[in-house]
Amino acid sequence: MPRDPIESTFSDIQSMKVRGAARIARAAALALKEYCTHNTFASSDDLSSRITTAGARLIEARPTAVSLPNAVNLVLNTAYHLKERGTPTREAVRVISATCDEFVAASIKAAETIGEIGAKRIVDGDTVLTHCNSEMASSVLIHAKEMGRAFRVIVTETRPRFQGRLTASLLAKKGLDVALIPDTAARVYMHDVDKVVVGADAIASNGAVVNKIGTSQIALIAHESRAKFYVAAETLKLSSDTLLGELVEIEQRSPLEVVPKRWVESNKNVKVMNPAFDVTPPEYIDLIITEKGVFPPQGIVLLMRDLYPTPTTNLS
Ligand code: RUB
């Protein structure tokens, strides 16, 4: 049977075969491109309606990374406008595919730009802590190394899925001086840390950052130790719906990521909870590094109003 790009990408994202907010967004855009180039459509109306259903399915794969709906909606808006203009189907397919490719190229470029901007904040002698596996945070550290900065990196394991191991091996391959620690050792080592750099799955209009579970604890102890706390994230992570009072949904994942099945079976009275993300309040964040420059968390709302003037309702 031919591969269904929507269902296979849905399952890759849900199972975390594809993970990390930027990669999830790129995978969704490429799935929509494949969907529209490998199917036949009766009209641009038919294309717009079917790609909207496909996009809605992809958005359901994981609820927290706002880059996913932001990427899908960009493609769906293009399809909608092409339909409204009565664009011939073949041309509509061409424009939508080009939009998806441009989105992916812009996302890769944003990671480079964030790396270049963020690297300027790392200086010789620094100890930098990072959590989970963020392409944007890693880009900052790799660019700093390429700029010749001498610093060391501490990476938390990031239970329960151990994404920190991915980060540690990536950075070590790039020649960085890396140590891996259990999440529970973060406070012990924070005394040595000058800066924390993490990524984001969503950024709210008040500057709060949603990222991998454990991030907010690290922010709290960084604050206690007077270490700087930086978030590296493309503007695609801005959740414009939060301007309208919406909350970012925190994904709860399977208890089986935390404990083995036989343990669950022999401890039926224990409820095992596994939230995948948490929220770091703006007061614990020094800077948000984006491809459009660096912002204090309090400045995010202005950036959001510039980039998303009409989120869902006209606020003016
Ligand atoms: C990944 C995670 C990352 C952000 C940012 O969580 O929390 O810090 O997604 O990543 P998960 P990036 O492993 O559950 O997807 O900078 O790569 O977009």
Image (cartoon, rainbow, N blue to C red):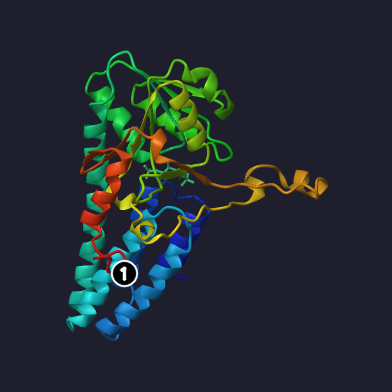
Which residue corresponds to the image point at 33% horizontal and 59% vertical from the top-left? 70
- Residue 5 can be seen in this image: yes
Please state the horizontal and vertical placement of residue 243, each as a whole percent of the image: 35, 58
The residue pinned by badge 1 equals 313
Residue 66 sits above or below residue 85 on the image:
above
- Seen in the image, is 236 located left or right of residue 92? right
Which residue corresponds to the image point at 50% horizontal and 59% vertical from the top-left? 11
- Seen in the image, is 243 located left or right of residue 156? left
* Tag count: 1
Please state the horizontal and vertical placement of residue 152, each as a whole percent of the image: 38, 18
Farthest residue to the top: give it. 125
- Residue 3 can be seen in this image: no
The amino acid pointed to by label 1 is Thr
The quarter of the displayed image where residue 25 is located: bottom left
In terms of depth relative to the viewer, which is nearer, 146 or 114?
114
In terms of depth relative to the viewer, which is nearer, 131 or 143?
131
Which residue corresponds to the image point at 33% horizontal and 26% vertical from the top-left? 174
- Seen in the image, is 1 located left or right of residue 299? right
The quarter of the displayed image where residue 82 is located: bottom left
Residue 92 sits above or below residue 235 on the image:
below
Ligand 1 quadrant assignment: top left
Secondary structure found at label 1: loop
